[in-house]
Image (tube, rainbow, N blue to C red):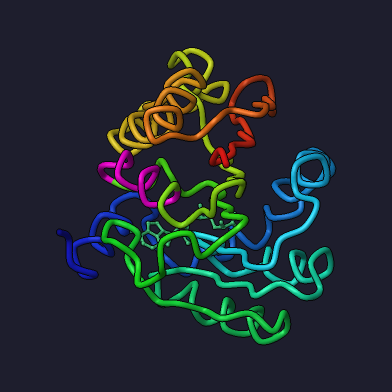
Amino acid sequence: MTTESTALGHLQAHHGDFANFRDAMINSSAGRFGPIWWGVFDTYVHQASAVVDLGTGPGLLLPMLRERLPDAHITGVEIQPEMLEPAQENAAKAGATLLRANLEQPLPLADGCADLVTCVMVFHELPHPPPLMAEMARLLKPGGRLLLYDWLRRDLRNYLDEDQELTPDTLQHFREHCLFSLDDLEFLAERNGLRVLESVGRRGGRFAILALEKPL
Ligand SMILES: C[S@@+](CC[C@H](N)C(=O)[O-])C[C@H]1O[C@@H](n2cnc3c(N)ncnc32)[C@H](O)[C@@H]1O
């Protein structure tokens, strides 16, 4: 089991300056939570009474979830102090609960507590992501849905921006961002008893949004 400080050390190596990373996440949120995300959401989420957003970051998704699910109990989970500050504000705006917890450990949430779990650009950040898939399956009620949005494996040639220097840091990001293919993510989901409803590619195959279901 990793402690919070080990998890933060890993994230620090991945993100560098936490405050810069928080700002980057805030500035790029309109791209993530745009028409493609909401198209998948509206197709696969018709109602939900309990929602958990894992790795909520600055918590920008929380008020957007509230608009669509006015009566749901919404929980955001996050560990980084710099993220927790804006996340607290957004959780308050959304009437949501914010839980400070480490996704590398079993969460203090009951089995089957959620009919919707969202996990956006988080899965690749864990040093060993597979147990998080099992944890997400555990949190879902039978019939509940998981929207998993993450990076997909690509060749280095396609990963690097034109003229981007290949520093040790870039290579480390490449390792983390390009670990799993779409088939790998679907395989991990299926190994944990989840059914793939649809996988939607984004930005020329850089990312995918997977709509997954825990069967009844
Ligand atoms: C790329 S950001 C995405 C934030 C948010 N989902 C969004 O799309 O705006 C990933 C978030 O996952 C959080 N995270 C990564 N590993 C975590 C862990 N072990 N426990 C809790 N949160 C974690 C990070 O702190 C960060 O805020």
Q: Residue at x 25, y 54 (%)?
A: 10
Number of numbered tags placed on the structure image:
0
Which residue reaches farthest left? 1
Q: Position of residue 153 (x, y in %)?
A: 46, 21
Q: Is residue 4 left or right of residue 141?
A: left
Which residue reaches farthest front? 216
**Residue 57 sits above or below residue 171 on the image:** below
Q: Position of residue 76 (x, y in %)?
A: 54, 70
Q: Residue at x 65, y 75 (%)?
A: 73
Q: Is residue 159 magenta?
A: no
- Which of the 4 image quadrants contains residue 60? bottom right
Q: Is residue 131 magenta?
A: yes
Q: Quadrant of the N terminus?
A: bottom left
Q: Is residue 145 left or right of residue 154?
A: right
Identify the magenta region: 127-136
**Residue 52 sits above or below residue 108 on the image:** above
Q: Position of residue 62 (x, y in %)?
A: 67, 69
Q: Quadrant of the C terminus?
A: top right
Magenta stretch prevailing secondary structure? helix
Q: Residue at x 49, y 72 (%)?
A: 83
Q: Is residue 179 left or right of residue 93?
A: left
Q: Nearer the viewer, residue 158 or 58?
A: 58
Q: Residue at x 40, y 76 (%)?
A: 100
